[in-house]
Image (tube, rainbow, N blue to C red):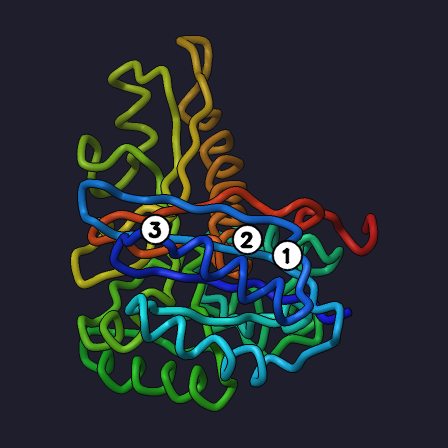
Amino acid sequence: MSRYCLTVACPTKRGIVAAISTYLAETGCNITDSSQYDDTGTGRFFMRVSFASEQGLAQADLEAGFAPIAKEFAMAAKFHDEREKMKVIIMVSRFGHCLNDLLYRWRIGALPIDIVAVISNHMDYQKVVVNHDIPFHCIKVTKENKTAAEAEQMRIVHEAGAELIVLARYMQILSDQMCKEMSGRIINIHHSFLPSFKGANPYKQAYERGVKLIGATSHYVTADLDEGPIIEQDTIRVTHAQSPDDYVSLGRDVESQVLARAIHAHIHHRVFMNGNKTVVFPASPGSYASERMG
């Protein structure tokens, strides 16, 4: 059986769920998981349905048959083949905790993605990336060459067919043009002290203020720095007994986990843009399972 998921976003209207379920049943598809949300504030409806085509229908046939329903309800609808792995480019600077975590999850199958390249403005992680048989590109970025450097980055993105860029602690600000071109397809991670503790050494600033919660935020990148629609967040408690270095180490763990969960949600098509925020549906059963242990 072929397995797919269908994502739908449209104006709210009576009969949407009935139309979708009826279509799938009539085309020999068995629904295995379904989530929906009706935002009464914006008048928008969102739905994600996982299903198995018991007749082995091709994706193109499903899309063609569904087109009249999508038109009737003014849907932004898309079918996704669950066997296809999303092509991802990771960008990193000199903090490697998120990169190393993602490489491990990718290696054991916990993140079913196709890492087509790693781009960095430093050489620190060339060896570890190449040892994973992943292309590594070092592109230095300065004030003078920023435009040219970004053009080279986008050339790699296009040539590799990348569908998602992950900023795994990439410490360069992306241009408005790049953010717009890759809108909804760049995910960033940072600590959750903003806007309280900006600039250098945010963990030290938090320590000096006696902060009791350390957190991380993963979001889509927009032209508004660190203010894009949030996908995932988490926190961990600290006490007066922790040192500033403890804060940093604990913070790195939270950052790695939050980024991985945000990517997992995106690649499984569980995230829907809803104005300046997102709708994130729960994971389907079995989607966290790893192919191997190490």
The three-letter code of the residue at mark 3 reads His
Q: Secondary structure at mark 3?
A: strand
> Is residue 60 rendered to the left or right of residue 72?
right
Q: Secondary structure at mark 1?
A: loop
Report helix, strand or loop for mark 2: helix
Q: CA distance from mark 3 to mark 1?
A: 18 Å
Q: Quadrant of the N terminus?
A: bottom right
* First reached walking from the N terminus: tag 2 or tag 3: 3
Q: Amino acid at mark 1?
A: Leu
**Mark 1 = which residue?**
111
Residue 219 is labelled as 3
Q: Position of residue 38 (x, y in %)?
A: 32, 44
Is 164 located above or below residue 44 in the figure?
below
Residue at image location 24% in from the left, 82% down from the top: 145
Is residue 223 positioned above or below 293 on the image? below
Q: Are marks 1 and 2 in contact (CB under 8 Å)?
A: yes
Whether residues under marks 2 and 3 lie with C-beta atoms below 8 angstroms apart, the answer is no
Residue 131 position in % (x across, y down):
71, 70
Q: Quadrant of residue 122?
A: bottom left
Q: Position of residue 175 (x, y in %)?
A: 21, 72
Q: Mark 1 and mark 3 in contact (Cβ < 8 Å)?
A: no
Residue 149 placement, left or right of 275? right
Q: Residue at 64% of width from left, 60% of height from top? A: 51
Residue beneath the point at 21% across and 53% down = 275
- Does residue 219 appear left or right of residue 57 in this picture? left
Q: Label 2, on which residue? A: 264
Q: Earlier in the sequence, mark 3 or mark 1?
A: 1
- Amino acid type, callout 2: His
Earlier in the chain: of badge 1 and badge 2, it is 1
Q: CA distance from mark 2 to mark 3?
A: 13 Å
Q: Residues within 10 Å of mark 3 (few under 14, many from 20)?
A: many
Q: Residue, x 59% and y 55% (percent of image)?
A: 102
